[in-house]
Image (tube, grey):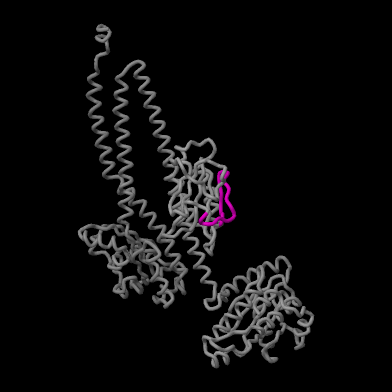
Amino acid sequence: MTEMLDRRAPPRPFFNKLLMPFLGAVTVAMCLSVIYLPAPIVDRMLRDDVHRKAQEWRLRVLDALESGSETFARATITRGDELWLSQVTTLSEIYCFKLIAAEGQIFWSTQAEDIGVVNEMPFFRRIVAAGNPYYQAEDRPVSEVDDHFLRSASSNRAELYEDETGKLMRIAEIHEPILQNGRVVGAIAFYTDLTELRAIFVDRLERIFIALSVVSLLMLVVTSTVIRRSGRMQLRVINQRAEQERQMMAEQMRLARNVRLLGELNEWLQSSRSLDELFKMVGRFMSHILPNSEGSVYVYSSSRDVLVGSASWNGGHHCDHIRAEDCWGLRRGRTYTFGSAEVDFPCSHSESQDDRPSFCFPVLAHGETVGLLHLKAKDSVPLEEFRASQRLAQMCAEQISLAIANVQMRDQLHDRSIRDPLTGLYNRRHLTETLRRQLEQAHREERPLSILSIDVDHFKRFNDTHGHDAGDMVLRAVASVFEQVCEGDETACRMGGEEFMLLLPDLGLPTAALRAEALRGAVERINVRYGEKSLPRITISVGVAVHPEDGTMPQQLMKAADDALYDAKGRGRNRVAVAGEDDPTQAEVAALHASPSPTPQEEAVA
């Protein structure tokens, strides 16, 4: 044995001499990469992200301004523009932005003291005025950052900046040029704070570089050690290391894939236009992100009394409706895990005979519960493997919650933009869009379409006699009748003042005239009380126009209905007139052929 040991190959001094310098050089290179690479990479990522968001906000600002790009040519904004612009900083990560005319003068800013100041920086004329965006990110002392940002920050954050006035903040400034007919008419300057976001990304990237550096160094050391071994020990160590590397690579690839899928999920969800579209995206992505889990998602109804089943994936199923008390996660206000404790209870919305482990994640947005994410382990999936996916599932729930809140907020804003605030009916803008769409469909399918133009008789006299509050009550009562009698695709709109219009698809002249007469009678039977007294009888005059006889374009059809309305008012009011009919009794004759009994909707109104 001693002879065998003595016969071992002598150490290779040349290899040993090269090994340590090589390891030292690699260590230095990795340390330098940890120190110098993360910040430029993150800055490039943030620059691209700020460019993209600035372009999105430029489009949103131009869409919101009443005159669009012409606002910059005139360098003036309306009161409505100012109200909308003042809300931008509260709805986004932008803490300051300015509207700049072509010559560099700031004509609106979140900082009032900037208004009227001329931007004389060289980059403005050289880059922005030439139609190119300009981006700059630099570190600034907290004391130099706009007070507006400190006021808009949370109290804890503001206290932090006050206590650390010597700290630097990473501020991104980007100027987006505004073009009109190929000519630069102005620019929008956005300012956002990247301090925390940059620090988070740099820290994460540094950790990744450190981890990779440590792993690489360990691999070099182990490899050098393995090379110096012989026989089966060398082969066994190499095989073990190869297996570890395979597992580590598989884990890294799995993590990278999950990060990529989460990023794609967030990007797609933020671009969804409706909840139906959003839940389709959720179903497709979740089947890839969590392949070992069956899942379903629920969202609160508008009345918040039940949760509506919206999507399922990987063989899961969802109920049409569940109540909050059916889920232990919603009742307890936190994530509920079934199947991990010695004693636990299944949720009512889950199958009682199914003892597979499951998660119930309350979906929270802005401190409010908006839905529920339910996950259940597939058959033969171990409990440990299923529980290991909890953190990833929680991140998915957070992404889904923010997307649901954003879509619901967009839906609410859109609904407000097409509704009359007094009566709750649709406004003129919505009627015009709907009428154009319905006319195209009626023309394409050769189907009739009728429109009723309605005016409350002597409404001005009514306002002068009983006051505007009573007049508002009358308008709401009349609007309630219109809303109740509309069915299916029928649309009731308030055009302004005491004028209304009803859009009745698939109704020809006889049926439309009968509906108009029934509607007139239903309004006449309204009894409105104001204070301790009943208001005088309410009557309406109605003009009826039909596609295609009275017009094929929206303005033609609306004018025909208005002309018929004026005809009805000229005949003494409280009556129905049909467009193009010279016989003043035409509508009355049509009404006589109608059933004398009111419809169920009219009975409900009466």
Q: Is residue 355 above or below residue 128?
A: above
| Residue 285 visible in rendering | no
Residue visible at 53% across and 64% down? 302
Quadrant (top left/top right/bottom left/bottom right) for the N terminus: top left
Quarter of the image for residue 452 reads: bottom right
In the picture, measured across the screen, residue 342 lies left or right of residue 15, that is right
Residue at 41% x, 31% y is 246
Q: Is residue 597 visible?
A: yes
Q: Is residue 135 magenta?
A: no
Q: Is residue 345 above or below residue 425?
A: above
Q: Is residue 310 magenta?
A: yes
Give the image quarter of residue 441.
bottom right
Q: Which residues are magenta?
A: 308-325
- Quadrant in the picture for the C terminus: bottom right
Residue 240 location in percent, x, y? 38, 25
Residue at (53, 52) in percent of width and height: 297
In the rendered image, residue 112, in percent from the top left (x then y), is placed at 31, 74
In the shown orientation, is residue 575 left or right of residue 28? Answer: right
Q: Residue furthest front?
A: 343
Percent of width and height locating residue 197: 33, 54
